[in-house]
Image (cartoon, grey):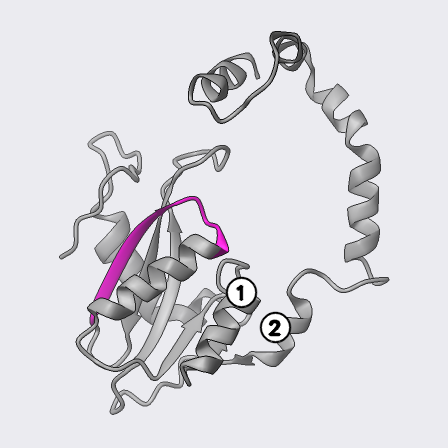
Amino acid sequence: MERETDRLRAFGELSISNEVADKLKRITAATIDRKLKHQKEVLHLLWSKGGPKPGSMLKQKIAVRLTDWDTAKVGYIEADLVFHCGASTLGSHVCTVSATEISSGWWEGEPILGKSQDQCFWALKEIRKRCPFVWKGLDADNGQEFINEMLYKYCAREKLEFTRSRPCHKNDNAYIEEKNWTHVRKVLVLPFGEESGMTLRKR
C-alpha cells in the first residue's frame, strides 16, 4: 500500500494530504475490510434476488448468438477485450479492443488505457472506420465494456445486428478468441514471458 500510494501521488492520480497519505500507508487489509463491510453488504443486497444485477435488464434485450455464422455474408464482427496486465489487474493498464470479421478473417485492434465503456466505444468506432467493408452486425461477450446502453443504442441507430455470447462460454466467440492469441497475445510477449501493453503491432 505504501509504494502504491506514493506512485499514485507522483503521477497525480491521487490528490490527498500528507496526513491522509500516512494513514493509507499504515492501514491493514483487515481494517480495509472492516471499513468497507457495510458497503459490501449493501451491494450484496442490491445484486441478490431482491434486485437486478447491473446490465441484466439490457442483456435480456440482446440476443444470444452461438457460432452459427453464415460465412457467405461479409460484415459480421466478433469483438473482445484483451488485458495486458501481467499477474495483477490492479491499477491502470493497456487493453486491446480486438475485432475480426467472420467471413474474411480480417482483424483490427485498437489499444486503450483501462476498460471503460467510453474507451471501448471509441475504439470500436475507430476500428469500424478502417474496415474496407460495411458492418452488418456486432457480436461481443458479456462484459460491461460491451453490454451497455451506449453501444446498444449505437447499434440500433446504425442498424447493426447486436448479439452476445453466453456467459462463461468462450467457444461462442471462437473466431475472435483465435485472433486474440495469434494477433495480440503472441505479439505482445516480452522475452521473459510477461505480457506488455505498451505497444501494439498489427500483422
Q: In which quarter of the image is residue 23?
A: top right
Residue at 41% from the left image edge and 53% from the top image edge = 119
Position of residue 203 relative to residue 155, above or below, is above
Q: Nearer the viewer, residue 130 or 87?
A: 130
From the top left corner, tell me how far across and down residue 50 is, in percent.
86, 62
Q: In the rendered view, does 47 fall on the left or right side of 1?
A: right
Label of residue 142 in the image: 1
Q: In this view, does 61 lie above or below 196?
A: below
Residue at 17% over, 49% down: 201
Query: At 27% across and 34% down in the image, what residue appears?
Result: 193
Element class at badge 1: loop
Instruction: Give the quarter of the figure containing the N terminus.
Output: top right
User: Residue flagged by tag 2: what amino acid is it?
Assistant: Lys
Q: How many labels does the image show?
A: 2
Q: Image height check: is 192 above or below 110?
A: above
Residue nearest the viewer, comparing 174 with 111: 111
The picture places residue 28, in percent across and down from the top left corner, at 69, 16
State left or right for residue 175 relative to residue 63.
left
Q: Residue 83 carries which label?
A: none
Q: How crowded is mark 2: few (under 14 residues within 10 Å), some or many (20 or more)?
A: some
Placement of the C terminus among the 4 image quadrants: bottom left
Q: Read off the magenta span.
A: 106-117
Q: In this view, does 185 lie to the left or right of 144?
A: left
Q: Which numbered marker is on residue 59? A: 2
Q: Residue 108: in sight, yes or no?
A: yes
Specify the quadrant of the image occupied by residue 76.
Answer: bottom left
Disc 2 and disc 1 in contact, CB within 8 angstroms = yes
Residue occupying image coordinates x 55% and y 65%: 148
Asked if residue 116 lies in the magenta stretch, the reply is yes
- Identified by mark 1, the residue type is Asn
Left-right relation of 63 to 20: left
